[in-house]
Image (spheres, grey):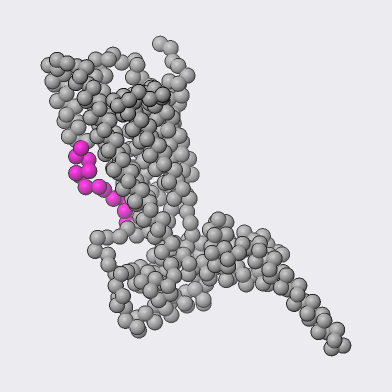
Amino acid sequence: MSISLYELFLALIIGQCVFLIFAIQYVPKKHTGANRSIQYLLVIYSFFLFERAMGDQFERDFLRLYGNIINTFYLFIGPLVYTYIRRLLFYKNGNYQLAYYHYLPALLYLVYCFFHIYTYDSIKDLSSYFNTLLFCNDVIFFVFISAYLFRSNRLLNYYKKNEEQELSFNQTIIKYIEITLIGLWVYMFFWLLGIVERFVVKLPIDIRMIWDISCLIFGIQIYIVGFYNLKHPEIFKIRFPSNNENIPKRKNLLDESEIGKIQNLVDDFFKKKKGYLRPGLSLSILANEINITTNKLSWVLNNIYKKTFYELVNEYRVEDFSQRINENKHKEFTVVSIAFEVGFNSKSTFYKAFKEIKKMTPSEYIRKIESFNKRKKSINKKMLFYLF
């Protein structure tokens, strides 16, 4: 039995996939629930790639009879992707489960697969039957997976929108999730091309080429998932809104005395205790430090301070950084090291926050301060000259 270069490539990706399925469970147990979801996804990817690699080795009747069973796994991709993102980005969602009815289509399809096997010998026009079956399969799977990708995109957009309400820094997790979802959307695009090519109109790109590209997309995704999960950076999560969470919208949530008390606690935390120096500071950590609920703290920040958590914390950090520049600390230490000392946990977050607050880059600010100090020295020298 000869093996083509393409089949060897698929075998290598399957090997990588199987390695990750077992390796992920040995990384630090920070995101156990999310890891389980990604392991299940990798199992599905493995089945898909195995089918592509070994499909030609099976008899046509065997594939027609039992091949649909493997297709059942496609109906798990959408729910698992959504569950993975939900568990990864939101705290208290580590063991989040979708309701059973989200998996009901997979169960119904599996029942159909057994019915298909049972009635296979009685089918008279196999060609017409399989044409209809393949078309229905492709359309149903495309719509079902795409629906969950839309939900996953909404979930990510909510996280991006509310991250600054609860965190004082930016994370690489967003880029990772974005790349993962983009990869799946590209895969769905080629899936749609496959439907058009097979059942609507012949395209310049052959269906086998479409399948090969789809495998390549899965292969790239597997390596991205492997790199990120084995590297396993710490992920700071935010709250997922409950259906009855209307506290932030109420204007009369707190009376003036309680508002004043919370303001004093917040100001004391930042001004006296310099809590902004903590790189991993988040809304939930601050709420715990000053012993109030995150909802009350968020309400005060939004309605009294008129700032997001990100804006408030980084204003203190940028002010501390500026003070150190005024004291010429940049002549002893690098700009980035000073930024880390005042609480920033990444160069990109520092530059972004500094420019938003000061309306200039750190290097422009340093040049401005040095120019001001030179003029100040020059004026002082002239005054001394005239005095003496």
> Does residue 99 appear to the left or right of 339 in the view shown?
left
Whether residue 378 is situated above or below residue 318 in the rendered picture: below
Between 30 and 148, the one nearer to me in the picture = 148
> Does residue 110 appear to the left or right of 45 in the view shown?
left
Whether residue 47 is situated above or below residue 186 in the rendered picture: above
Start-end of magenta stretch:
92-105
Between 302 and 278, the one nearer to me in the picture = 302
Instruction: Tell me, yes or no, if residue 204 can be seen here.
Output: yes
Q: Quadrant of the C terminus?
A: bottom right
Seen at 26% across and 23% down, the residue is: 67
As for residue 31 lying within the magenta part, the answer is no
Provide residue 75's location: percent of width, then percent of height: 26, 36
Provide residue 323's location: percent of width, then percent of height: 62, 72
Outermost residue to the right = 388
Seen at 53% across and 70% down, the residue is: 316
> Does residue 280 appear to the left or right of 134 in the view shown?
right
Seen at 24% across and 34% down, the residue is: 140
Provide residue 23's location: percent of width, then percent of height: 42, 37
Between 16 and 60, the one nearer to me in the picture = 60
